[in-house]
Amino acid sequence: MLPKVHIITGAIFALLIWIIFPSVGWLNALIIFLSSFLIDVDHYLYYVYKQKDHSLKKAYRWFIEKKERWFRLSKKQREKETSTIIIFHGIEFFIVLVLLIFLNKIFFFVLLGISLHMILDFIELKIYNVPLYYKISQLYILKLNKHKHKELE
């Protein structure tokens, strides 16, 4: 989904959490909000790695164009293309956050924001009839990519 959808939804979700559970406090609500869209920094890191460029605007446009081209492919064509490894969008990162909760409760609020983000991403995958495994495990995507063609540029 587009960042603005994550930002708006994250703001509404964090505000509702703060209103329903005032003991959460404004700082933890802010953490929920920020983590609901800042998880997408992995997209930017991927762009910097692949394109050797640091422009946030160009990264945004590059991913939008790449996504639009990918969604226009047939299911069969999609299966031939490698998928983008976005390190914060998988169960692996989720598990790390769950473990970090035992060190500091702040990670619980990070996990809430990221969970909202992932739910929205899963909804988008369902809308476009894309298998959910594209966002469930990045290690699995890495394994699948080993047997595929060059990435869609």
Image (cartoon, grey):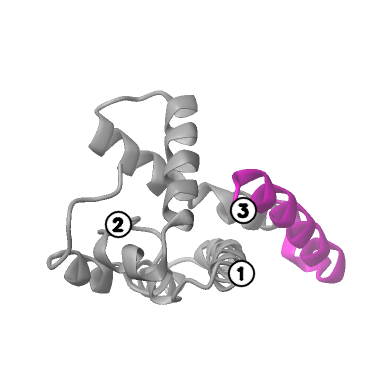
Nearer to me, 110 or 10: 10
In this figure, which residue is indicated by the disc labeled 2? 85
* The N terminus lies in quadrant: bottom right
How crowded is the residue under tag 2: few (<14 C-alpha within 10 Å), some, or many (20+)?
A: many
Q: Is mark 3 on a helix, strand or loop?
A: helix
* The C terminus lies in quadrant: top left
Tag of residue 36: none
Residue 19 placement: quadrant: bottom right
Q: Is residue 77 shown left or right of residue 109?
A: left
In this figure, which residue is indicated by the disc labeled 3? 31
Residue 60 is situated, as x and y percent measured from the top left of the image, at: 49, 35
Q: How far apart are marks 2 and 1 (CA)?
A: 21 Å
Q: Is mark 2 on a helix, strand or loop?
A: loop
Amino acid identity at mark 2: Ile
In this figure, which residue is indicated by the disc labeled 1? 127
Q: Is 144 within the magenta? A: no
Instruction: Identify the mark nearer the N-term, 2 or 1.
Output: 2
Q: Is residue 15 shown left or right of residue 121?
A: right
Amino acid identity at mark 3: Ile
Q: Give the range drawn in magenta.
A: 1-27
Residue 102 placement: quadrant: bottom left
